[in-house]
Amino acid sequence: MNKNKPSTLDPSLSLSEIKRRHDELVKLIQKYDHAYYVEARPLISDQEYDNLYHELETIEKLHPELITPDSPTQRIGESPLSGFSQVSHQVPMLSLENTYSKEELFGFLERIRRGLPGKKISFTVEPKIDGISISVIYKNGLFSLGATRGNGTVGDDITQNLKTIRSLPLRLDMENPPELLEIRGEAYMSPKDFERLNAEREKEGKPLFANPRNATAGSLKQLDPRIVAQRPLAVVFYGAGQLKGFECKTQVEWLQFLKEIGIPIPVRFWHCKDQNEVYEATCTLQEIRSDLPYPTDGAAIKVNEWEYYPILGYTAKAPRWAFAYKYGAERARTRLNQVIFQVGRSGIITPVAEMDPVFLSGTTVSRATLHNFDQIKRLDVKIGDYVFVEKAGEVIPEVVGVDTTQRTGKEKEIVPPEYCPSCGEKLFWEGIFLRCGNENCPAQLKERILHFAQRNALDIQGLGESLVDQLVDKGLVKDIADLYDLDEKTLVSLERMGKKSAQNLLRSLEASKKRDLSRLIFGLGITHIGQKASEELARYFGSMDRLANASEEELLTVPFIGEIMAKSIISYFRKPKNRERLEKFRKIGFNFHSLDSGSSPGPLNGKTFVITGTLSEPRESIIEKINSKGGRVNNTVSRKTNYLVVGANPGSKLHEAKKLGIPIISEQELFNLLKEN
């Protein structure tokens, strides 16, 4: 949009005529925004739109007294916020209970019917949108407040950020609007917009978002609305909060009302009279999910008649009149064209399938891991096969099967390489893994640096893949410790590295020296030692020196550390090169002591927690709070789990915890537990 085009205002116009034209422009632009951003139906050309927008800007510049809160020019604030204030939800924003099978779905519907004996009930089936839950309040038709779900009771005030989203009207399109109308829904990023955003970030050397949901969450957490305005966010609404001066009887009526007043609603929803129609609708939704403009992970099933909601009631976490039917991992079929071999930080060779691009779970996928050569043999996968691809944990694409009915006989076996594709060293087998033993291998070094710099390790922002490639390929970094010898002059000489980017990276490198010991241990990339084990080692030993000199017997007394892990730790610290690196880290001021030593057990000592769903705080922050009280956080539910902490949109861990009878608590109940202790 060209906002710098010179424009003048007819001096012969009276103030009343100017005001009339101002109001007309506001309504016209709102109309064109709705047609373009909500209905995907442009009514005028970009040039015509720009001319109208600029005319409005000119009027408001000359007559600022005419500016109204719903003017399109008021979407973007002029300065960053200092922080987000808190908003209390007068009507709690609850999550939905999940079902995972047809039997569970029918069971839930039957429980609803038993709770309403003799009543005539119908249901709605809507897409369960995988976005960020939001609440928006209109007072007398004017957008006045927007907030995140938070913990369901209290969320963040993101009014200024939501105002930048053009599919969200600033004024309702209706005569005599209600005194107060609170609508609830999701902010999201369409798969196509997500891909475009990541492509732009890659060109700029910025870290990529893992998926559309992360991109949306990261955007809404920005304190500068001007940055949010540049992100391709959209909104869709389906729920109600507070209502004053308005009454509604059914969910279908509510959705139709929202659509009539210009609020974006799900593009498809179904009104069903019985369980068979409900199930049929969920199947149809699953078939078309890849065609929808937003990422979905299931169906939201609700009692249509609002009068039954108080009768059915609520649990502490969810309504009893609605639930979610979650789909399994989305699967796609495509042709495998060739296999390349990637070298990991420990030298393990991973076969990666290069395929015809296919759309899967919100992104276009052209590569997928084959894990190892034992997996290739088990699947009997060959070059030229049509393969089935899923996203492990909805993030990493993996080949999970072969469509053997499509074989022509021209397919080729996948042959393991003899030599490292990076350094040329002869490879050797270690169990089912093929490994490069050259620790100076450039590919291994690059992966070690990226692991060291990742968020859960030293969190060195600005050290992305393209920059690491340059640093290693140009011989500027031959060991992780060499990162701390870099200077501004060297960095500025590299591609896509300006002075500001170089200074930011150097600041981030300096800050990384002060990270907790557990992060440094994890960042070292010791074979078999993950984030959880690193935390336990830091808590138990309290210092890097004690850990580096620990015996196998000592290591085996640490929770979660087994014999293979203990031998790996000893092997790492015995190597002179690793000792030299640690000595350099000591000299340049790295923190070698834990902020959470095991010398004084916390009140939650020995308690094991598992987290599922989205919480109001970053997961890392929650984990640190639990750890600080002596508790531990695991990734999987088992009989040894003491508590499952449930946030919004929980996954299959909730189902598993219910089966095992594990105590289930909300985020607020966790905070209460932490305060009590």
Image (cartoon, rainbow, N blue to C red):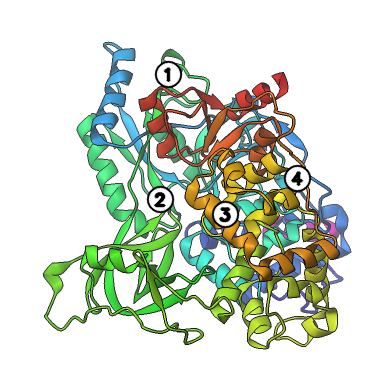
In the picture shown, does residue 236 fall above or below 200? above
Circle 4 is placed at which residue position?
Answer: 594
Pointers 3 and 2 in contact (CB under 8 A)? no
Q: Tag 1 or tag 3, which sits nearer the N-term?
A: 3
User: What residue is shown with label 1?
Assistant: 307
- Of callouts 2 and 4, the N-terminal one: 2
Q: Nearer the viewer, residue 478 or 249?
A: 478
2 or 4: mark nearer the eye: 4
Residue 662 seen from this side: yes
Q: Name the amino acid type tagged 1.
A: Glu
On the image, the x and y values in percent for residue 209 come to: 57, 62
Question: Which is nearer the eye, 142 or 215?
Answer: 215
Q: Is residue 117 above or below residue 127?
A: above
Residue labelled with disc 3: 214
Q: Please state which amino acid type lies under the numbered disc 4.
A: Ser
Image: magenta residue range:
15-26
Q: Which mark is residue 155?
A: none
- Alpha carbons under labels 3 and 1: distance apart: 36 Å
Q: Quadrant of the C terminus?
A: top right
Choose the circle earlier in sequence order: 3 or 4: 3
Mark-to-mark CA distance, 2 and 4: 52 Å
Which residue has dot 2 on it?
267
Mark 1: secondary structure: helix
Q: Is disc 3 placed on a helix, strand or loop?
A: helix
Tag in front: 3 or 2? 3
Residue drawn at x 85%, y 58% is: 15
Say if the magenta span includes residue 385.
no
